[in-house]
Structure formats: C-alpha cells, structure tokens
Image (cartoon, rainbow, N blue to C red):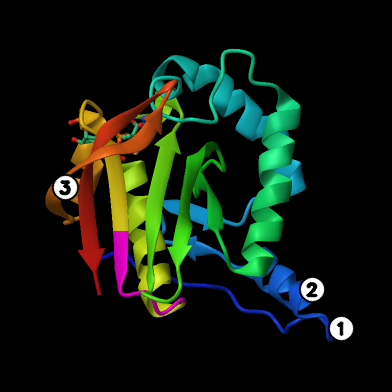
Amino acid sequence: MIRVTPERTKPAGGTDPRERITAVARALRLTDGVVELRAPRRADAAEVYAAVCESLPELLPWMVWANPDYREVEAAEWIRRAGRAFADGVEYQFVVRLVESGELLGSVGLNAFDRLNRWANLGYWIRTSQQGNGFITRAAALVTDFAFSELGLGRLEILAAVENTRSQAVAERLGALREGVARRRLRVGEAVQDAVVFSIVN
Ligand SMILES: CC(C)(COP(=O)(O)OP(=O)(O)OC[C@H]1O[C@@H](n2cnc3c(N)ncnc32)[C@H](O)[C@@H]1OP(=O)(O)O)[C@@H](O)C(=O)NCCC(=O)NCCS
C-alpha cells in the first residue's frame, strides 16, 4: 500500500509565516519506498532541464510550458515560482525521484486551487525514458493522499485533452471517476481543446 510519510522538522525560528512554510516545504518528503517527492529545490534545475529536454517530443503536444527552445533558466524559474507558490499556499509542486538511484523522473503538482470549495487540479509529467513503469501513478497517489490528509481538500480534478490517452490512463489507474468532457477547457499548444474531466474525492 502506498503510504504518505511527510518528514516534519521544527519550523524555522523566525516569525515570518512565509519563512516558516518554506522550511516546512524543504523538509517535506512523500514516499512509498519506490518514488520520493520533494518540493523543487534550486539544485534540481539542471536535472529538471535534462529530463525536459529528453522528453520534449512527448511534452510539447500537451504541456503549455514546454517549448522547442526550452532552456535551463526556465527550469530554474519554475523552481523559483514553485517555492513562492508553495509558501503562499496557491500551488504545491513536487519533483519526483526514484528512491533507489535518486534519478529525477518528472513532476507532480497541485494547482488551480479553489480554497472556498476545497478542490484543486492534479497535474503530472514523467521523463520519456522512465515512462511505462507505473512511477507517475505512484507519485500522483502520494500527492492525492497529501492533498486530502494534509491540505484538507475534498476533491481533485484531472484534466486530460481528449486525445491524451496516456494521461487518461493514469487517472483511471488512480481510481478517478470520468465525469465527462468539458468543452474548450484546456490549452494545448496554440489551441484550447476539449478535455476529459476526472475527479477523485475524499
Ligand atoms: C501522462 C504520463 C505522465 C503517463 O506516464 P506513464 O509512465 O505512462 O504512467 P504510469 O506511471 O501510470 O505508468 C503506467 C504504465 O506503466 C506500466 N506499469 C508497470 N508497472 C506498474 C505498476 N506497478 N503500477 C502501474 N503501472 C505499471 C503500466 O502497465 C503502464 O504501461 P502502458 O502504458 O504501457 O500500459 C506521460 O505519458 C507523460 O509525461 N506525458 C506527457 C505529459 C502529459 O501529457 N501529462 C499529463 C497532462 S494532463
């Protein structure tokens, strides 16, 4: 069974809530013994960049941030923004690694928070060379548990373009319910396309 084991440390001494939350983010580790998830760190930039570059043909059709000229500064900028968003409680991005080797696999994250109604969107990608091993399903299950048990959310949505069958298969493996197709819901490349809406509820 997949288990969430956030490592907790004493919050940093200062009274600035952002600093305290940043310290919690740095200490957070979700793992099931096969994959481990941590909030992105500055030192991850080169590996994120390498994983993205390797995977561009798979990412370009679906991920709005992917572009053919993706540069390492974009990875660094993503990490910087992820840190701020975590501290502000508006997004929770995680870098996924293999426990055994430490290899960076990709990312899973919670975004589009609707605090009032207690739901968020769950997104993910994995480097092409590690696709097909079940790692993203494992990582997404850990983030789902984190969202429900630590953030108190009651619902996660997964949006997958109607043609993105690999992403839909992840949602199905997670046990998400296919609720229907939302029209013009997801930006994919230059176009906004119809998307299958999946939900997981607590
Ligand atoms: C969508 C994406 C993350 C799916 O990655 P994935 O590796 O296929 O997903 P999983 O981790 O669930 O792995 C499932 C595969 O591993 C296999 N597998 C092996 N061991 C497994 C295990 N223990 N548990 C589950 N699946 C396992 C499954 O049979 C499946 O293989 P198949 O696709 O050949 O049938 C990946 O294709 C990707 O990054 N795409 C580009 C970005 C993207 O579209 N993101 C989603 C936007 S909404």
Q: Is residue 49 above or below residue 169?
A: above
Residue at x 76% of width, y 30% of height: 73
Residue type pointed to by label 2: Glu
Residue assigned mark 2: 19
Badge 3 marks a residue whose secondary structure is: helix
Asked whether the viewer can see residue 132, the reply is no
Q: CA distance from mark 2 to mark 1?
A: 7 Å
Residue type pointed to by label 1: Gly
Asked whether the viewer can see residue 4, the reply is yes
Badge 1 marks a residue whose secondary structure is: loop
Q: Confirm or deny contact between disc 2 and disc 1 (CB under 8 A).
A: yes
The picture places residue 102, in percent across and down from the top left corner, at 57, 43
> Residue 155 magenta-drawn?
yes
Marking on residue 172: 3
The foreground one among 70 and 126 is 70
The picture places residue 14, in percent across and down from the top left corner, at 86, 83
